[in-house]
Amino acid sequence: MKKFIYLDHAATTPVHPEVINEMLPYFTQKYGNPSSIYSIGREAHTSIENAREKIARILGASNSNEIIFTSGGTESDNLAIKGIAEAYKDKGKHIITSSIEHHAVMHTFEYLQKNGFEVTYLPVDKYGIVDIEQLKKYLRDDTTLVSVMTANNEAGTIEPIKDIGKLLKEKNIFFHTDAVQAAGSIPINVTDLSVSALSLSAHKFYGPKGIGALYLRRGVNVIPQNQGGAQERGKRAGTENTPGIIGMAKALELAYDENFEEKKQRIMNLRTKLIEGVLSSIDKSHLTGHPENRLPNNASFVFEYVEGESILLNLDLLGIAASSGSACTSGSLEPSHVLKAMGIPVEMAHGSLRMTLGTGTTEEDIDYVLEHLPAIIKKLRAMSPLNRG
Ligand code: PLP
């Protein structure tokens, strides 16, 4: 059989078999519309409410009504950002985000900017960490919302969300965090983080695609972003994705089971071996993101004098799936806005490679990458007109 090594878990993950088992009856037997009053409808409704309670408990929410089901990370981000900004626009129209957000957040801020809001973009340091002192300087009387991601999807850097949450709580400013990459990988507790809203997406933690959740603290208003039925207590119209919701709750439970620390440590050890192996065997290679304060599964680099896309194609020929920047930007010639914001020169940012490990990654997989990657980079550099090294 052809070798296949999947090192792109930040793009998406395979669905856990136990998650599929939990979901299956909701396609074939328990398929009732949760709004219907007969028994299979009520059964679906009860299962959704149980899933909501489970997710609320795992995230440390104080009430299950604080969980709103959506179609994924993108929709959760849109609902939180546009929903809060619009709900409080009479209080102020100044909103703040970081310069390294996923497009789901960044383009939502750009949309609001085109529609009468004033947006301030927070700079980051060379590791991709936002500067809280700078944030303090940007806050104004008319600032209503700040959105900073929990961990970055490209470089893996973990942001000081708890400190930002504390600051904004004192100032009475709403705080949204996109925890799409962080959920399932590092502990998340909405109370501990003092966030007003937090976005999740199941397909990043071994759940199905097309289902997500928004934690919205009780008392925080949002203007609904789609008009229709009264589902999700009027905040998100549309028939609920019952199998998806059941699957997401199971996936989150499995991610944070009693073996969480052990799983995290195993992946971190392999990740460290990969990082050290790459940096020691390939010259003019640089780790991107923070050396320690990063997601346990993220190994991301830039290589001088090579194109990220060419590395990906060569890895693919060997059966290795990886990414160059975020999955959504690959195919575009623009270098990643994240690497640019971190001060990485544009020529270097073109040579980016992100490898993200998962529960199925083995030591042999890492050995295989370390056996082949140096030769790929060497071959590409030999062909590169940019290479004067
Ligand atoms: N936010 C971050 C940080 C992400 O990495 C992604 C997906 O890559 C999203 C949001 C979008 O999530 P979804 O694919 O569920 O819409």
Image (cartoon, rainbow, N blue to C red):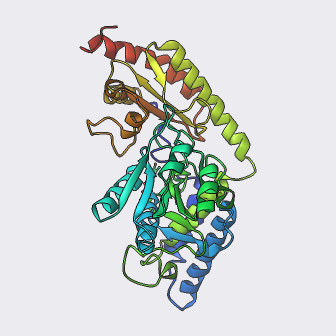
Residue 201 location, x and y as percent? 50, 57
In this view, 29 is above or below 102 = below
Quarter of the figure that contains the N terminus: top left
Q: Quick one: which residue is furthest to the left in this view?
A: 385
Q: Is residue 201 visible?
A: no
User: In the rendered image, is residue 220 in sight?
Assistant: yes
On the rendered image, what quadrant is the C terminus found in? top left
User: Which residue appears farthest toward the top when viewing the image?
Assistant: 389
Viewer-proximal residue, 327 or 220? Answer: 220
In the picture provided, is 339 more to the left or to the right than 177?
left
The x and y percentages for residue 269 are 65, 30
The outermost residue toward the right is 258
Residue 239 screen position, x and y as percent:
44, 78
Q: Going by the image, does 61 lie left or right of 308? A: right
Measuring 52% from the left and 81% from the top, which residue is drawn there?
233
Residue at point 51% right, 13% down?
A: 281
The one nearer the camera, 196 or 198, is 196
Above or below, 244 relative to 237: above
x and y percent of residue 199 in the render? 52, 59
**How many numbered discs sit on the rendered protein?**
0
Q: Nearer the viewer, residue 383 or 187?
A: 187
Would residue 47 be found to the left or right of residue 12 on screen? right
Above or below residue 218? Residue 23 is above
Task: Compare residues 334 and 43 and report the one nearer the observer.
Answer: 334
